[in-house]
Every structure is written in C-alpha cells, then in structure tokens.
Amino acid sequence: MNAMNSLDGRTALVTNINHFVGLAAARALAANGATVVCHDRDFTDADVRSAFEAANAGYIASPAQEPADLIAATERDHGAIDILVSNDAFPAIRAPVESADLRDLRAGFEEMVVAPFALIGAAVPAMKARKAGKIILVTSAAPLRGLPNYSMYAATRGAANSLAISLARELARDNIQVNAVAPNYVESPSYFPAELLEDEVARGKILKNIPLGRLGKPDEVGALIAFLASPGGDFMTAQVIPVAGGWA
C-alpha cells in the first residue's frame, strides 16, 4: 500500500452506514488500514452486519442518537477519532414550491444540516487538542446545478456544502481538513436503488443525463473518501467535489 494512502493506526467513524454510500466508505477506509466504527439507527440487516465484519469494521448497534453520546462512546470504545465521515441522506421529495410541505423542508434541514453540525461540534474538541483531523461530509451535486421541483432537497444539500467550506476555513489552523464529497447518479439504496435501475425505461431516462453514459458505483465514492482521509489529502480542504459522471 502506498504510504500516502495508508490509514494504518487511524480510527474512522462513519455514520448512517445503511444509507447512501456509508457501507462503501467503511469498506474503503478499512481496506486502507483504518479501524472503522460504523453507526446507524438500525443494525437489523444481517447482510450488512456481515459486510462490516468482512471489512474488519467495528460498529455501534445502540439506537442512541445524541451526537455527543455517539462521539463519547466511540472514543471510549475505539480510541480517538481521526476521521469523521458524516454520510447523510434524506428523501429527495419532488414538490413544486407552491405545494411543498414546509414540514418536509424542516425535516430535511434537521437530517442533513443540523445533525452533521452537531456531530462535528462534538468531535472537534478532541481533534483540536491533537491538532489533527479529517472531516468528510457526504452531500450531493444537486445544488451545484439546481433541480427543478426538488428545491427543498437542493437547498438542504447546498447548506451542507456551505457548511463544509466554512468549517474548513474555521478549523484549518488546527490542522483539521474538512471537505464535501458530492455524488449524483450513483447507485445507492437511498436514491438510485436496484429496483429503479431494473426498469429499462427509467434507466434510459436517467442515463441520458449523465455525460459518461453510466451510473456511478458506491465504491468509486468510497475510494475518494479514503483518499481525502489519507495523508495524500492533507493539503486539500474547503472543497466540494462532485462525483457525478460529468453532470456537475
């Protein structure tokens, strides 16, 4: 393994592992040597548990979701958190602005902005004390172009992208790098599940939007996350990096 990509001796926490690209991120980090702590509200899927174990990843199965409690439990049971991957997902609800339900908008901000903000706030003190840390938000490329009738989703994702940039500049003097990985058109249970892609008509409509002519693989996003977490990414911060096949 290239020393610039090695994560030997590092501990990573990946959230919402059952969603979006959480599992791919955990596998990539573990493959590069990190001890990976996986967290989600629900660990009932036996196949996912097996995948964690195959990746030599630890996990917290407790339903407790308070950010401070999660960070404290991880540090107590697995050591200092060197890498925090906030892998956040919320349904992309299609609604014209005049008929959108503001409860959906508020719930989207809670899940994709407030929750990662609180989690990062709980993790940062220890990173500051060590003068080292990597924080990676998994967001979306949607706000980089805008999506008609999906303004609630794009707005929440845009806020998360802005959060990454602002925190990167706030924390740079403490040698903490913060970046956002912004996928779109990537196969995932959250947005482009297998059952959707099996529909030839739907798949054809989707592929027309992607310059590379195919959907992305979760492992491709995981590889980028692992790079940003590695020493090779030490001079990268305040970046929103689209992984969208040329769409953004």
Image (tube, grey):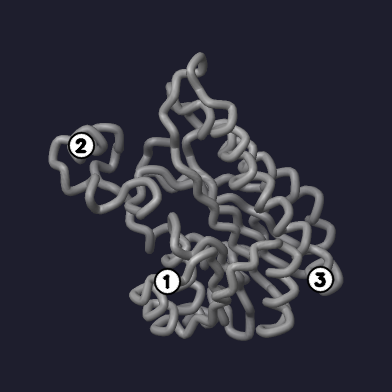
Q: Which residue is mark 3?
A: 126
Q: Secondary structure at mark 3?
A: helix
Q: Which residue is mark 1?
A: 44
Mark 3 crowd level (few <14, some 14–19, many ≥20, 10 Å Cα) = some
Q: CA distance from mark 3 to mark 1?
A: 31 Å
Residue 132 position by quadrant: bottom right
- Answer with mark 3 or mark 1, whichever residue precedes in sequence: 1
Image quarter in which the C terminus is found: top left
Q: CA distance from mark 2 to mark 3?
A: 46 Å
Q: Secondary structure at mark 2?
A: helix
Q: Amino acid at mark 1?
A: Thr
- Residue shown at 80% from the left, 55% from the top: 171
Q: Which residue is mark 2?
A: 202
- Residue shown at 29% from the left, 33% from the top: 209
| Outermost residue toward the top in this view | 98
Instruction: Note whether 37 is above or below 119 in the view shown.
Output: below
Where residue 173 appears, as percent x and y from the top left, is 84, 58
Task: Tell me if residue 230 can be seen.
Answer: no
- Residue shown at 59% from the left, 58% from the top: 86
Q: Secondary structure at mark 1?
A: loop
Q: Amino acid at mark 2?
A: Ala
Where residue 46 appears, as percent x and y from the top left, is 36, 76
